[in-house]
Each structure stands twice: as structure tokens, then as C-alpha cells.
Image (tube, rainbow, N blue to C red):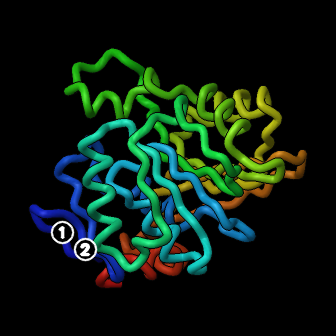
Amino acid sequence: MNTMSSRGFTFKQFHIEHDQCAMKVGTDGILLGAWAPLAEAQRILDVGTGSGLIALMLAQRSQSTVNVVGLELDRAAAKQAAQNVAASPWAQQIDIVPEQVQDYSPTTGFDLLVSNPPYFTPGLALPKTRSQARYNETLSLAELFAHARRLLTPTGRIGLILPVQAQPEAIAQAAECNFYLHTQTAVITKQGKSPTRFLLLFTSSKCCTTHNELVINTKDSGLSSDYVSLVSPFYLKM
């Protein structure tokens, strides 16, 4: 579906180097970058941008007037994300900021915040940079929603991808900050199985939640038409 080498991933319109990033290019980031609703979003914030993958995907999907900011606390990853952006067609649209969201204070609010946030509970023995990217000790869901309230415009939205077990906490923490679940897409790796992930969109207005699902592989192990339609603008061989 894409060209992968020891030097990263090549997509249809950009290339990702990720050897300096704790978390590599993966399905979760690709799903969020392809799925996040962009209607009326002129300023987008990608929290924990890593290699810059999601920021680049959102820029590809956006008009040239849209500005995307990628926040990354790890300096090596932020440097590599900036290099990936500089080599892309959207170098003028994307800014990589080497800061954690807790310290970030822009002068203008964002219309959309996206994040593929850390979700492993501390306890596993992982290298420090990998644990920073995966553990919720560096950015809890409570902190993420609290800072989203500070950084978003009054009508701003939040797009996340989370494992199913993290969904109840996300909904509860969102409500504490007056965000409400607008859309929930269940990600099912193979038809007939239970979902493993949720793509979640939160808004500032109470609403009826739309529930749907995205099946990646059909029962005969082929890719579903819905999945192909979603990610084909990005994968090189699709």
C-alpha cells in the first residue's frame, strides 16, 4: 500500500522519515489523519505530532489557506518532523513547535485539535522516549481536554483515536471541560470482530452522537471499500 524502507515511509504526496521518533508511522495515526473532519477549520493543532505524519495528512486534505501547527515535546522528533515538513509540498502551511501542550500559549485560537495521545498505563519497562510517547504520565486525557478548552475557539472541535478501553474516561474527562461526543467511529480490524479503536470527535455543543463503524479487512481478508476510500489518497499503492 505504501513504500517502506529503512529510511521511512513514502506516501503519494510526501515522505516520512521517523528513525528519530519514539513512535513510528502506524495505522492509528493514518486513520486519524484521514478521518478527522476538517469542515471550516482554518487553524489546526496536532498535539504530539511525532514525525509530523498527521499534520502532513491534514495539510494535504486542506485548502492552502489553512495553517497546521504540530506540537512535539521530544526535540529529536520535532527536528525530524520539521525536516519532513520542509521536504513536503506544504512547508508554508505547517509549523512544528518543539513544546509540550502544557506550555504552549498561541495568540490565536484553533478550530480543530487532533491527537493520537499516549494511552498505556505506566509500568512497562520501555526506553524513556518511547515511554514518553506512549504513557499517559506525560499527557493525561484530563490535561488534554483542559488545554483544548484553553487553546480552541468557542466552536472548536477535538478529534482523537483511542483504544476502546479508554473511551469511557475520554467521555468523562471531556464533559468536565464542557466537550461532548459528536461522532464515534468504531474501528474493526476484521469483519465480525469487536472494535479495537474508536475515532472520536468532540464539540462544545451538546448533540446527539452519531455512531458508525469502519471495517479494515473483510471476512475474506481483503480491504473493505470504506477503508480504501478513506486512505487511498495517501497510500502509494492503493
The percent position of residue 165, horizontal first and vertical second, equals 55, 33
Where in the figure is residue 134, as x and y percent of width and height?
37, 33
Q: Amino acid at mark 1?
A: Met
Q: Residue at x 41, y 28 (%)?
A: 120
Q: Amino acid at mark 2?
A: Thr
Q: Residues within 10 Å of mark 2 (few under 14, many from 20)?
A: some
> What secondary structure is marked by label 2?
strand
Residue drawn at point x = 69 percent, y = 60 percent: 212
| Cα separation between marks 1 and 2 | 6 Å
Query: If the image is split into quadrants, where does the N terminus sit?
Result: bottom left
The residue at the point 48 percent across, 39 percent down is 117
Precedes in sequence: disc 1 or disc 2:
1
Quick one: 108 or 208, which is closer to the camera?
Answer: 108
Judge from the rendering whether residue 76 lies leftward or rightward of residue 28; answer left or right. Answer: left
Q: Which residue is rendered at x = 61% and y = 45% of the image?
A: 106
Q: Secondary structure at mark 1?
A: strand
Q: Which residue is mark 1?
A: 4
Q: Quadrant of residue 64?
A: bottom right
Q: Which mark is residue 82?
A: none
Q: Any mark on residue 10, and which?
A: 2
Query: Which quarter of the figure is the C terminus placed in?
Result: bottom left
Mark 1 vs mark 2, foreground winner is 2
